[in-house]
Image (spheres, helix red, strand yellow):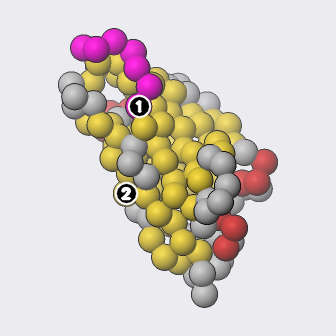
Amino acid sequence: QVQLVESGGGLVQPGGSLRLSCAASGSIFGVNNMAWYRRAPGKERQLVASITGSGRTNYADFVEGRFTLSRDNAKNTMYLQINSLKPEDTAVYYCNADVLSALGLRNYWGQGTQVTVSS
């Protein structure tokens, strides 16, 4: 059974930083594209950033250079470094990944991690 587990969320003051992690576990043969999404209160889910298996990244315009996405393929883990946090970054952040396992290539979601930016 494949699982995506996020960690690293929390309460932070404006201007602060957080590092989110997403680890894929289970009987995994490989992890292809990975991505972070977020859903703010009262808003639709939006793509934050994505990374291919080879490490090519893509960011939403609102990131404005404040976020850095990386991955460790040996650990099947993705990291999102978030700097200069703003109150509007408050949201539940979800990990998404295309995982190859005995069940084939499937898309999975994590349970989400809350990020709250407030003074």
> In which image quadrant can residue 43 be found?
bottom right
Tell whether position 104 is magenta. Answer: yes
Which residue of the protein is positioned furthest toward the bottom in this rendering?
119
User: Residue 10's quadrant in the figure?
Assistant: bottom left
- The numbered mark, 2 or 1, whose residue comes first in the sequence reads 2
Magenta region: 102-108
In the visual, does 67 lie left or right of 116?
Answer: right
Q: Name the residue tied to disc 2.
A: 7
User: In the figure, residue 27 lies in which quadrant?
Assistant: top left
Residue 21 makes an appearance in the image: no
Residue extending farthest to the front is 42
In-front residue for pair 41/91: 41
- Where's the C terminus, which quadrant? bottom right
Q: Does any portion of residue 110 appear in the rendered image?
A: yes
Q: Residue 86 at x, y = what percent?
A: 68, 71
Q: Please check the rendered image and state whether residue 107 is part of the magenta-colored stretch, yes or no.
A: yes
In the image, 40 versus 49, the foreground residue is: 40
In this image, 50 relative to 8: left or right? right
Image: 34 above or below 70: above
| Residue 45 or residue 21, whichever sits in front | 45
Q: Is residue 100 left or right of residue 41?
A: left
Amino acid type at circle 1 is: Tyr
Residue drawn at 76 percent across, 54 percent down: 62
Instruction: Kindly identify which residue carries mark 1.
Output: 108
